[in-house]
Image (cartoon, rainbow, N blue to C red):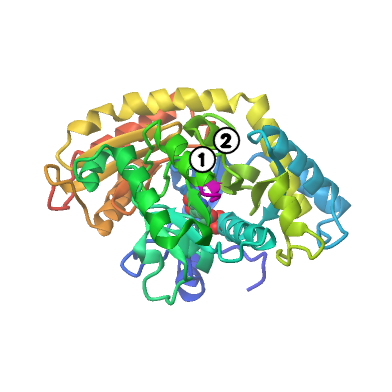
Amino acid sequence: MTNNDSLSAAELDELDRRHLVRSMQRGYIKDRVIITRGRGSTVWDAEGNEYLDAAGGGVWHSPIGHGRPELAEVAAEQIKRIEFFTSLLEFSNDKAIRLATRIAGLAPEGLDRVFFTNGGSEAVETAIKAARLFHFRNGEPDRTWILSRHYSFHGATYGSGTATGLPQMQHGVGPNLPNFEKLTPPYPYRAEMYGGAETTDFCVAELEATIERIGAGNIAAMIGEPVMAGGGVVAPPADYWPRIQEVLDRHGILLVADEVVTAFGRLGSWFDAPNRGMRPHMITLAKGIAGGYAALGAVVLTDKIADTIIGEEGFFHGYTFQGHPVACALGLETIEIIEREGLIGRAHEIEAELKAGLAGLKDLPTVGDVRVEGTLAAIELVSNREHKIPVEWHVGDAVAFEIRARHNVIARPYAHNLVLAPPLVTTTEEIARACHAVAEVVGRLSPAGDIAP
Ligand code: PLP
């Protein structure tokens, strides 16, 4: 087989099973959908079937939609100039410099320095190392503990995976990294977690008690998503982050906002941390940063942190392809497109359309909660509404499968949540079609987990 041989859908299917190990692959999922083409919010599989992508490219990473010729031109232009040269030591490149400058201009005040990575896990990994090294260089080498929260998703490498609050990420691959502690997140739908206390009061008291137990002088940083995405699009009460921040500041603990999902317009602004009252020392980015047209991530840092970790000795950390000029050129064009096409404004409209389109689901017997934050939506599927018992993961998978098979709409299961994250170019009609598809299929789901024909 040469690279240019045309392969039938059946041949691709067979070779996929034979050779490819895919992300989050599960043995019980026998189906394959081999996507070969995309335009805007529409994608096509190898058999020519057309789907509405209501999942932002599957992992909420696509703000500007698929298959844009202008991005192909940007990439080609850069490759013709030079594809890549290292950003190591004294070397740098024009596209990485420009994109870092653009990101610093959009980021919350005081966050002016950018360390590029190839994705979100590497960004989180970098932020964890940077937090520990910052304290080390400041004469506090014991500050190594990292606080994160249950239900969070921060990545799949050992550092980011240990911070992740989903036990599946740590199961069977231990020992995981030491000196990580998980806190209870604010989760208004599951208020029983707080034993009758008010949500933020509980979380703040738990944080204070955790700091007391571990010792403030042993804690480097807390990492949290402004709105938990993979955990099920869970937004905190308005006073949560300001009060958490106050406690962290009082104890010299750094705050890392993981905006891998929430930045670049997904929640209706360039960055979501300021909207939630976070004043982070670092922000991690990936996904939408290059529109999904290249693998790119970043950590945005304050001058103080960047200068301290670089120091005279240097930050002995980096990745071969960091600051890749093709990825950075695509990132620059993505920002241009979001601005030129008013996609942040469109995100606000999509939020209203999702809220209206999904409102009817709240009354269904298998729906515990419906949450919409910007262009993210989660339908929390339960087998028992009264006791809020989540459906098994395979039920969420089956619901997403049926939505695709019956309606040619791609929604994504995340644990027991069904999630929508349409590209910001999705039209009003397409949002209505996605909501209708979800409502139709979830309407046929029984508490026992069967989907009526
Ligand atoms: N942080 C958050 C909030 C994420 O949702 C993810 C991935 O979904 C990551 C980090 C990891 O990013 P990546 O998959 O690019 O390594």
User: Residue 122's x, y, as percent?
Assistant: 60, 60
Q: Which residue is mark 1?
A: 262
Residue located at (24% from left, 45% from top): 194
Which sits earlier in the primary sequence, circle 1 or circle 2? 1
Task: Residue 157: tell me if it is visible.
Answer: no
User: Residue 55's x, y, as percent?
Assistant: 44, 43
Q: How packed is label 1: few (under 14 Cα within 10 Å), some, or many (20 or more)? A: many
Q: Amino acid at mark 1?
A: Thr
- Mark 1 and mark 2 residues within 8 Å of each other at the beta carbon: yes
Q: Is residue 356 left or right of residue 193?
A: right
First to last magenta residue range:
251-258
* SS state under label 2: loop
User: Residue 67's x, y, as percent?
Assistant: 62, 42
Residue located at (36% from left, 53% from top): 209
Q: Which residue is mark 2?
A: 271
* SS state under label 1: loop
Vertical comparison of 140 with 35: above or below: below
Respond yes or no on whether mark 1 lies under 8 Å from ligand 1.
yes
Q: Quadrant location of residue 72?
A: top right
